[in-house]
Image (cartoon, grey):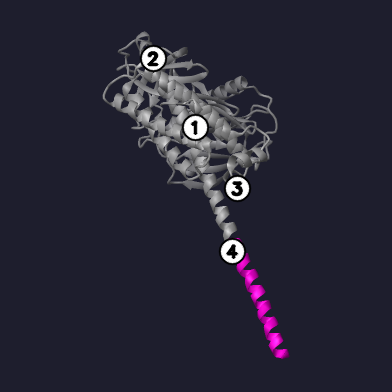
Amino acid sequence: MVDKSRWLIACIIILIILTFVTGYYAFKLREEYNNLNKNNYTEAFSNLVNYVNSVENYLAKAMISKSPEHAAQTLTQIWRDSNLGMVYLSRIFSENEGLSQTAKFLNQVSDYSYSLSRKNINGEELSEEDFNNLETMYKYSVDLENTLNQLSEEIYNGEISWDDLNLNSEAKFAQSVDSINVFSNIDDNLNDYEGLIYDGAYSDHINKKEKLGLTGDNIDEENAKKKVQEFFGEDFEAIETNSSLENADIPSYDFSVKLKGKEEKYSIMVSKKGGHIVETNLDREVYEEKISQEEANEIGKSYLSDKGFENMKETYFVKQGNIVTINYAYNDNGIIVYPDLIKVRIALDNGEVLGIETSGYLNSHTERKYIEPKISIDEAREKLNPKLEIMSENMAIIPTEWKTEINCYEFKGKVEEKEFLVYINVETGKEEDILVILDTPGGTLTV
């Protein structure tokens, strides 16, 4: 009888343990599943925000484009990005009215931009009504972008969780957040809607097979070290070899350099062909900002001139950690040559140049034969959208994705509070490109 009781107790204990283990295993599985869902939601939402931002920028470009060829490319991009936005939106949830309105908006933007692109491809210019519709879509896209960015920030800061959003979203959301109800914002902003780049202009270097600025004969390591000593001059103290970069876009020698009176070491790359300085860098903390942007622009220009890079003009910049990186383009008698680009890093505490990067210049710089314009700047101005309020104009050379260059008139202007750069071909009068200028807390950029 005792043995039977012990056996029964043992069975009960085993059953309890199995129940606990099974429950714990089920709990862990559910937790892993929930975490996976949250990660999937976060990734999908991040992609949605990125594509809505892209739609907003391309709508801004389409709003002022007059060239059917260029407008067709822009509208096709809007069609593509709005479709991709809908794909990622569908991976989140669809019960909420605000997000249903978002889906409706993206779907109509997609359809409308596609129909306008077909019109352009057939050689037709967009009508005034078309441009008015694009402007309406653009204004709604700005509202939607701002709202989604707010929601993104609140999710990131932990003010809202995906569980809150998925559990009877509106009521739960309103209870969990004291701020504005974002979903209601989307609903309100789009309810009346019925029917429808780090860095500046051309700062992504085009790696050409023929390096036009990489002149001279191949040099050995010892001669490369002499180039380093010449570059730093009397500040130079000691040098050591790091490596030889054979497979880089510009094959180079890589050195570390000790300068007099400095604890930190500079890294510097010297091209094997011609002994050109490809890149320099000094890593140090910069704790305060005393130098203005205008002063930094002049410091960088003077530094480049001292190092043999004459006639460089500042274009765009980005600021991070009290360090500003300024893009300088070659200025040839008033013509801005964007492919010949050098980046300069400047510490804003004392104006020290922390580094330069010359790959764009070494890829492209050469003595050019300039094309005589076949249309005047006045005729080019007539090709612009009349809504564009012109702020400045000059000539420029811009790179293409086919690794060629185009001579253009560059017009800087704005529509309402949005600033643009528009490029008109000096030979054909064709609208070659439109860039949106973004003034951000970190600098002036273009997309």
Using the numbered discs, state the Cα–Cα distance from disc 2 to disc 3 in whole angstroms: 50 Å
Q: Position of residue 412 (x, y in %)?
A: 46, 16
Residue lying furthest front: 1
Query: Which residue is denoted by mark 2 in the rendering?
Result: 384
Q: How many marks?
A: 4
Query: Which residue is denoted by mark 3 in the rendering?
Result: 163
Using the numbered discs, state the Cα–Cα distance from disc 1 to disc 2 in whole angstroms: 25 Å
Q: Does the magenta run of residues contain 7?
A: yes
Q: Secondary structure at mark 4?
A: helix
Q: Is residue 332 above or below residue 48?
A: above
Amino acid type, residue under disc 1 in the picture? Asn
Using the numbered discs, state the Cα–Cα distance from disc 1 to disc 4 in whole angstroms: 40 Å
Query: Which residue is denoted by mark 1 in the rendering?
Result: 53
Using the numbered discs, state the Cα–Cα distance from disc 1 to disc 3 in whole angstroms: 25 Å
Q: Position of residue 390 (x, y in %)?
A: 46, 12
Q: Secondary structure at mark 3?
A: helix
Using the numbered discs, state the Cα–Cα distance from disc 2 to disc 4 in whole angstroms: 65 Å
Residue lying furthest left: 122
Residue 179 placement, left or right of 66: right
